[in-house]
Image (cartoon, rainbow, N blue to C red):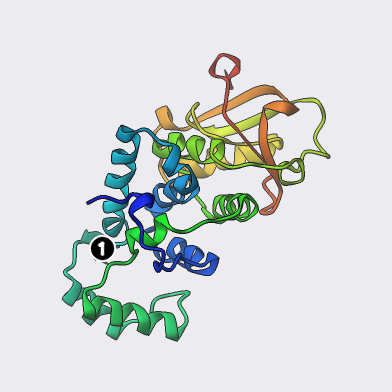
Amino acid sequence: MEHKKDNLNMTIKPYTEDEIKKFLRTIFKPNVPNLLKLIVQISDYEDMNSDDQLSFDHELDSLEEMFQEPAVILGHMIPETNEQKIARYKEYEVVGWGSEEFQAEIERLEKGESVIDLDRILATKLSDKFLTSLVLDVWSSVEFHYDLIDDLWKTIFLSIRITEEDRNLTELPDNFDVYRAGTKEGLSWTIDIEKGKWFHVRNKEVFEVEDKHNYFLKMNVNKDEVIFYTNGRGEKEVVLIPNQEKIIVL
């Protein structure tokens, strides 16, 4: 299927910012970065070469599967047909959804409609300010930044324009140490060594993370290496792309 902006009819209705936010609320959680990457790259579509456009189109065509959250029965992920999902949705409420959104999702499934109209999303123009705010909000709302998708987050951060205000670095010194519990490739670090130790213990004792995926790490960084800093969850979190040569295993 082609998704060329040049071929789009001018009557196609772009998505609103609220609709974009809704997609990210309703997608199967581990797939949030996949969808977010496509959203922040929409504006670059026209400048992509043909191979990159084909790759982008393929990812867009795969969006529907990203929303297919399987049922969890006795701890096992069970794939569902639309009919099974409709029956389950009518029996149980979806946590965090308002009644109107819930009924709209049931109606969509009953009609067999796609979650996202591919031409509409290509016709959608989003401001740099909105995209940056969206990315930072999504990052802060995700409890686990899976190490397998760190490359996705790198692409996302490199695709947005983060202002000095967004970076929030005023309270950080020019040079300082950061700590991390997890793999060496992870982007999420903290300036609080005790918080880093807490994550290290939690990973091991609560989530039973294998030692090879749960190092306790230290790295000395300069302020200009930091993508942004946030203490929204009391974690004194520094987000950055780590220099592997500077990492020390404690």
Rendered-image quadrant of the C terminus: top right
Q: Position of residue 224 (x, y in %)?
A: 72, 27
With 204 as the anchor, is 238 left or right in this view?
Answer: right
Tell me which corner region of the image, top left, top right, bottom left or bottom right, holds residue 67. bottom left
**Residue lying furthest top in this view?**
245
Q: Position of residue 114 (x, y in %)?
A: 28, 67
* Relative height, residue 210 to residue 66 (above, below): above
Q: The residue tagged with tag 1: helix, strand or loop? A: loop
Q: Nearer the viewer, residue 217 or 137?
A: 137
With 165 as the anchor, is 92 left or right in this view?
Answer: left
Query: What is the tally of numbered marks visible in this picture?
Result: 1
Tell me which corner region of the image, top left, top right, bottom left or bottom right, holds residue 171. top right
* Relative height, residue 123 to residue 104 (above, below): above
Q: Position of residue 25 (x, y in %)?
A: 46, 65
Q: Position of residue 162 (x, y in %)?
A: 66, 42
Q: Nearer the viewer, residue 118 or 59?
A: 118
- Amino acid carrying label 1: it is Pro
Q: Nearer the viewer, residue 135 or 13?
A: 13
Residue to which mark 1 is pinned: 70
Residue located 40% across and 69% down the image:
11
Residue located 44% across and 75% down the image:
95
With 186 as the anchor, is 13 left or right in this view?
Answer: left
Q: Nearer the viewer, residue 20 or 193?
A: 20
* Relative height, residue 106 to residue 120 (above, below): below
* Relative height, residue 98 to residue 208 (above, below): below
Residue located 46% across and 36% down the image:
150
